[in-house]
Amino acid sequence: MNKIISIRNLKKSFGENIILRDIHLDFYEGEVVCIIGSSGTGKSTLLRCLNGLETIDEGEITFDGMDITSPKTDLNLVRTKIGMVFQEFNLFYNMNVLKNCVIGQTKVLHRSLEEASQIAMKNLEEVGLSKFVNVDVATLSGGQKQRVAIARSLSMNPKVMLFDEPTSALDPEMVGEVLETMKVLAKKGMTMIIVTHEMSFAREIANRILFMDNGMILEDGSPEQIFEHPTYERTKEFLKRFR
């Protein structure tokens, strides 16, 4: 597998509060990596560092051979290749479903409206929302909004998709439809890095699990290793809640 993201000596603080410390990680094309751990351990911050939404204090992150921590790197270009799906959807509520999936393509990738619409339609069909193209996103359920957000990211043809707790803002009955959409993407070989509290989902979908604690990667292994034979007492404590 080809290495797509490499992180070395990553440190990140907010004031006196150290959020990430001495992170060394590599991610490979086609991997589905789930990041688990208690709230406040740096999982979402790590994800936001990967596409330049947070400025790091020390270290280096390279994506597809580009040093994204260098001031010379065009972060907008990087973000076209790294899709991000947020907890709270981050959709344009003054636009319909189709326009939400078209605007980034026309503004950033300079695709024609016709080409962008065709690509958006294909991806909306993929997430089961082709019937909703002309519907205002404000009227959709939470699960539908999150699937629009996924289609919007896919329409930029990213090399990697980042998911920051994509089901945490959803009602329980909406969670399944979003997770099913993500499972389909995983089967198609999309490289995905997912921060999640859905342990059964992580166990089923991931090739690899990272357990974070106190701003560090405490464990890094296969789902079987992490869930059945964790090395650290802290990991065992955390997983007890999900037995």
Image (tube, rainbow, N blue to C red):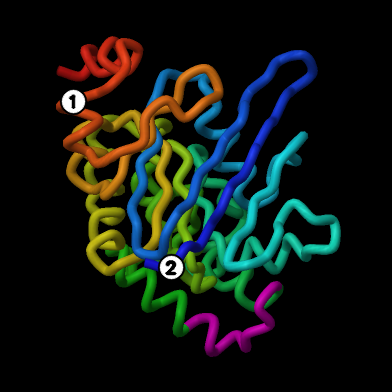
- Say which amino acid is labelled 2: Asn
Which quadrant of the figure has residue 182?
bottom left
Is 128 magenta? The answer is: no
CA distance separating discs 1 and 2: 28 Å
Residue at the spot x=59%, y=47% of the render?
7
Tell me: 85 left or right of 125: right
Instruction: From the viewer's side, name the closer residue of 228 and 131.
Output: 228
Query: Please, which residue is most extreme toward the right here?
Result: 71
Question: How far from the left and from the top, in percent, is residue 117?
Answer: 50, 81
For label 2, the residue is 2
Instruction: From the viewer's side, name the closer residue of 109 and 191.
Output: 191
For label 1, the residue is 229
Question: How far from the left and from the top, in percent, is residue 137?
Answer: 48, 54
Question: How far from the left and from the top, in percent, is residue 232?
Answer: 32, 16
Residue at the spot x=30%, y=62% of the render?
185
Instruction: From the viewer's side, name the closer residue of 84 and 19.
Output: 19
Count the numbered circles shown.
2
Instruction: From the viewer's side, name the closer residue of 107 and 138.
Output: 107
Tell me: 139 left or right of 44: left
Which of marks 2 and 1 precedes in the sequence? 2
Residue at the spot x=51%, y=68% of the render?
158
Q: Quadrant of the C terminus?
A: top left
Residue span colored magenta: 108-117
Question: How far from the left and from the top, in percent, is residue 18?
Answer: 68, 19
